[in-house]
Image (cartoon, rainbow, N blue to C red):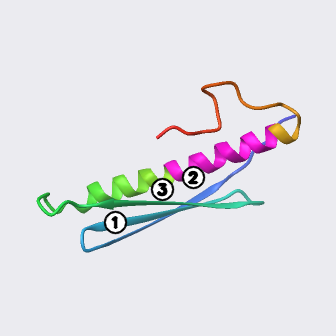
Amino acid sequence: MTRTLEWKIRLFLSEEDGTTKAKAVLDTGTTTLTGHGTAHRSPEDLDVPEIGDDLAAGRAMHSLARQLMKTADRELEAMGAGPPAPGYGPYTAP
């Protein structure tokens, strides 16, 4: 079986008072998942918005990845695959 899919991710960033917030929204065509991330600038740090964007976006995408892995784990277990082997799930990497 050959399949081709396109999943769309939209990334929204906002910054206010040294805090950058990110929201990553994944649309698979059948499901929508949303990940969130924040970055806080220390008062003594230089104001470089791109760094906050990178951190917050990375954290939002990481949140999305954790959700996808948990969804896959549940789907595998529902098909009788059993729990993941130690070190492979559920997805808990930092």
Mark 1 vs mark 3, CA separation in Å: 11 Å
Which quadrant would the N terminus be assigned to in this image? top right
Crowd rating for badge 3 (residues with CA inside 10 Å; few <14, some 14–19, many 20+): many
Quadrant of the rendered structure where residue 22 is? bottom left
Classified by dominant secondary structure, the portion drawn in magenta counts as helix
* 15 up-or-down from 54: above or below: below
Crowd rating for badge 2 (residues with CA inside 10 Å; few <14, some 14–19, many 20+): many
Among all residues in the image, which is located at the extreme bottom? 16
Q: Residue at x 58, y 46 (%)?
A: 66
Quadrant of the rendered structure where residue 48 is? bottom left
Q: Residue at x 73, y 40 (%)?
A: 73
Q: Is residue 33 left or right of residue 18?
A: right
Bounds of the magenta segment: 62-76
Mark 2 vs mark 1, CA separation in Å: 17 Å
Q: Residue at x 73, y 42 (%)?
A: 72
Q: Which residue is mark 2?
A: 64
Specify the amino acid type for callout 2.
Leu
Q: Which residue is mark 3?
A: 60
Sequence-wise, which precedes: disc 2 or disc 1? 1
* 30 up-or-down from 62: above or below: below
Q: Which residue is mark 1?
A: 20
In the structure shown, which secondary structural element does the residue marked by tag 3 occupy?
Answer: helix
Sequence-wise, which precedes: disc 1 or disc 3? 1
Specify the amino acid type for callout 3.
Ala
Along the viewing direction, whichever of 26 and 84 lies nearer the viewer: 84
Which mark identifies residue 68? Answer: none
Along the viewing direction, whichever of 34 and 30 lies nearer the viewer: 34
Q: Is residue 91 left or right of residue 20?
A: right
